[in-house]
Image (tube, rainbow, N blue to C red):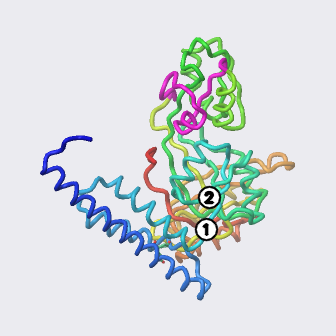
Amino acid sequence: MTDNSPEINKIRRRIDIIDDSILDLLKERIECAKAIGRLKDEDKRAKWDPLRERQIYTRLLENNRGVFPEQALRSIFHEVITSCRLSQKKIMVAYLGPEATFTHLAGVKYFGHSADFKAMESIDEVFAEVEKGRTTYGIVPVENSIEGAVFSTLDSFMKYRVKICGEVRLEISHNLVCKSGDIADIQTVASHAQPLAQCREWLKKNLPRIPTLPVFSTSAAAQMAANNPNIGAIASSLAIKTYELQVVVKGIEDYQGNTTRFLIIGSKSPEYSGSDRTSLLIGTIDRPGALSKILTVLSEEGINLAKIESRPIKGKNWQYVFFLDMMGHIEEERIRKGCQRIKNKCSYFEWLGSYPTGGEATSDL
Ligand SMILES: O=C(O)C(=O)C[C@]1(C(=O)O)C=C[C@@H](O)C=C1
């Protein structure tokens, strides 16, 4: 028992009353959300309303006027709103497992702690799970700021019928871990191919004679390290706790600000939110200048192209598809018109979805 001054005890009683009021208000809020959920059911309307959610954050941050730490305020209301949304409709999210991968971390960041998560063994299986309707959503990595595109994700869009529903950015820091925490015990470094590539220079300099072993996820590597004292793993901070490992060296990535962008996939894209991205998958007609004609449409319609990526079509040598990301929502006239004009100039056209932009990358959870 600490011996507190009467002043401290008085303020603590005040804090207890405030916490109880916050809890009462949270209970009242979730009941309101459930009531809206029932009304939306009657009208067969989507539960998720990204525009309304964005308005809530904007209003609260404005009213806060910088008093409560902004990032913390966002995180608190993110948990509150996702929990209210989940009270209207339970969701299950498939992710590239096992537990504690960076994709799992990104999923928790996006959907909050109240969602149910299901670990899959490959990106392909995450897509299959969503397409078959066995989970409401899936989350997959799509690009890294250092290594570029995640090809298996792009290729899966050609194979499965799913829609993009959202995006989330996570700043990634890699840790070298092993069972003892002693670098001298490490005879092999295991990880997913991307983290191994992102730490290539560090490994070459600090562990020059130690072979690397690519495995299907950072968590699989962490699991191997937990079972074998001579295996080091490059893994997330969540994996250290989950698999009871010791940190050898923190932050071994070759470049700072290493950020991965993840996509949320589902059966239906959300409505206009006021700050959206639209993704397309197109095949161009094999004619000189075909791609430049498409880019001209974008500039004529005043559409901002955020990204373009090409992928070879499997089984058709030297033929390519393009993944295009543009700023705006398909419900906006200029995007709808731009897409229609692009469609007329393509051999293949698929709208992959329009969804709220992910904002700043953060590593906090
Ligand atoms: O306002 C609504 O439409 C709600 O369903 C409530 C609520 C919320 O908790 O504030 C929950 C889900 C929606 O995505 C938006 C907001």
Q: Residue furthest right?
A: 315
Viewer-closest of 48 and 237: 237
Residue 80 locus on image (x, y percent): 44, 64
Residue 348 locus on image (x, y percent): 76, 64
The secondary element bearing badge 1 is classed as loop
Sequence-first disc among 1 and 2: 1
| Label 2, residues with CA under 10 Å away: few <14, some 14-19, many ≥20 | some
Horizontal placement of 81 versus 204: left or right? left
Residue under the image location 74 percent in, 66 percent down:
133
In the rendered image of this protein, does residue 181 appear above or below residue 209?
Answer: below
Residue under the image location 48 percent in, 29 percent down:
251
Viewer-closest of 13 and 278: 13
- Tag 1: amino acid: Lys
Query: Image quarter for residue 206?
Result: top right
* Pointers 1 and 2 in contact (C-beta within 8 Å): yes
Residue under the image location 50 percent in, 81 percent down:
36
Distance from the alpha carbon under mark 1 to that under mark 2? 8 Å
Residue 110 locus on image (x, y percent): 52, 56
- Tag 2: amino acid: Asp
Res 307 label:
none
Horizontal placement of 15 versus 105: left or right? left
Please give the range of residues in magenta.
Answer: 229-254
Q: Which residue is mark 2?
A: 116
Q: Which residue is mark 1?
A: 90
The secondary element bearing badge 2 is classed as strand
